[in-house]
Image: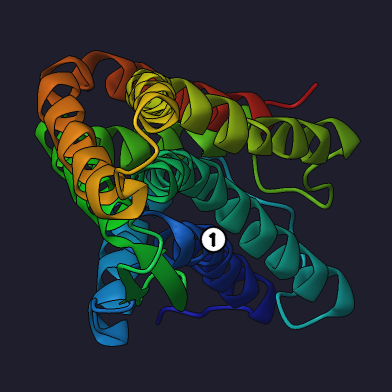
């Protein structure tokens, strides 16, 4: 007769629940997986499937009752680690959205806004377009699979233990958040520079011929120049976007490495 003790039952339960919590944290916040259009049942089912596949291969956690205070603290820490990993990749998408916001405002399309279900806010039409471009590159370059692979590797670099992310991990996430502004400005700089030259030319033209209606001429010209520059720069955006995605993966590996 097979007998199972309560300690063995707790160990088996914890060996599945704790990794599943980290996986759920990433699936909830990561781009594509965490989109609000993805049903919650799909997210939970995908997390359980990944957890069942990797649970036998990851290092065993501490021998604690998962329902005890220490076990619940580990559960909370695993959720924070998973959410931090997904948030680090989400910052990459926020950078490209900021580039679209800056471009749209410079073109004069600040009024062309749509509801963004991902951020539960409003974003410009150019930001939505660049965000979709980013998502296609994200899928074409298989970064969604790289993200899952990095998640699996994190159980070896940061095993399940009573200690979670240290102060260095939170500092790395905060520092990585600054890339929203730097990367967003770098991606939008060619278009913004062209529009700046366009505005200077219109200013000189208005000064030379005051009878011209600058509002009637400048608005469509700025929009036209903006769309032309977007069409010119899009073929060259794949390389910097892929590099930015790789930086996001490297940041995830950095924050999930015990130091």
Q: Residue 81 at what x, y percent from top left?
A: 64, 51
Any part of residue 156 in sight: no
User: Is residue 82 placed above or below 176 in the rendered structure?
Assistant: below
Quadrant position of the N terminus in the picture: bottom left
Residue at point 42% right, 38% down? 99
| Residue 172 left/right relative to 245 | right
- Tell which of 93 and 29 is nearer to you: 93
Location of mark 1 (residue): 15
Residue at point 23% right, 77% down? 42
Q: Image quarter for residue 229?
A: top left
Q: Residue 56 at what x, y percent from top left?
A: 39, 49
Q: Image quarter for residue 233?
A: top left
User: Is residue 167 placed above or below 229 in the rendered structure?
Assistant: below
Residue at point 57% right, 27% down? 251
User: Is residue 230 placed above or below 28 in the rendered structure?
Assistant: above
Residues packed near mark 1 inside 10 Å, few (<14), some (14 to 19) or many (20 plus)? many
Colouring method of the image? rainbow
| Residue 56 left/right relative to 63 | left
Q: Residue 171 at what x, y percent from top left?
A: 82, 34
- Tell which of 55 and 158 is nearer to you: 158
| Residue 77 left/right relative to 90 | right
Q: Residue 133 at what x, y percent from top left?
A: 18, 42
Residue at point 48% right, 33% down? 184
- Tell which of 162 and 133 is nearer to you: 133
Any part of residue 258 in sight: yes
Q: Image quarter for residue 74?
A: bottom right
Quadrant position of the C terminus in the picture: top right
């Amino acid at each position: 007769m097979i007998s199972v003790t309560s300690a063995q039952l707790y160990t088996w339960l914890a060996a599945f629940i704790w990794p599943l919590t980290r996986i759920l944290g990433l699936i909830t916040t990561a781009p594509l997986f965490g989109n609000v259009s993805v049903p919650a049942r799909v997210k939970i089912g995908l997390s359980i499937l990944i957890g069942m596949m990797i649970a036998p291969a990851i290092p065993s956690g501490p021998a604690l009752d998962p329902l005890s205070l220490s076990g619940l603290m580990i559960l909370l820490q695993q959720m924070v680690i998973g959410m931090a990993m997904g948030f680090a990749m989400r910052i990459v998408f926020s950078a490209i959205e900021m580039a679209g916001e800056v471009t749209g405002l410079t073109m004069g399309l600040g009024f062309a806004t749509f509801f963004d279900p991902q951020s539960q806010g409003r974003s410009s039409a150019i930001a939505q377009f660049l965000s979709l471009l980013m998502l296609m590159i994200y899928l074409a370059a298989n970064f969604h699979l790289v993200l899952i692979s990095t998640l699996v590797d994190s159980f070896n670099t940061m095993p399940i233990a009573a200690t979670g992310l240290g102060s260095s991990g939170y500092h790395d996430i905060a520092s990585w958040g600054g890339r929203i502004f730097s990367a967003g400005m770098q991606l939008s700089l060619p278009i913004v520079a062209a529009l700046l030259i366009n505005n200077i030319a219109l200013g000189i033209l208005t000064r030379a011929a005051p009878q011209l209606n600058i509002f009637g001429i400048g608005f469509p010209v700025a929009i036209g120049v903006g769309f032309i520059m977007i069409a010119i720069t899009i073929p060259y955006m794949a390389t910097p976007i892929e590099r930015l995605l790789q930086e996001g993966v490297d940041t995830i590996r950095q924050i999930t490495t015990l130091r």
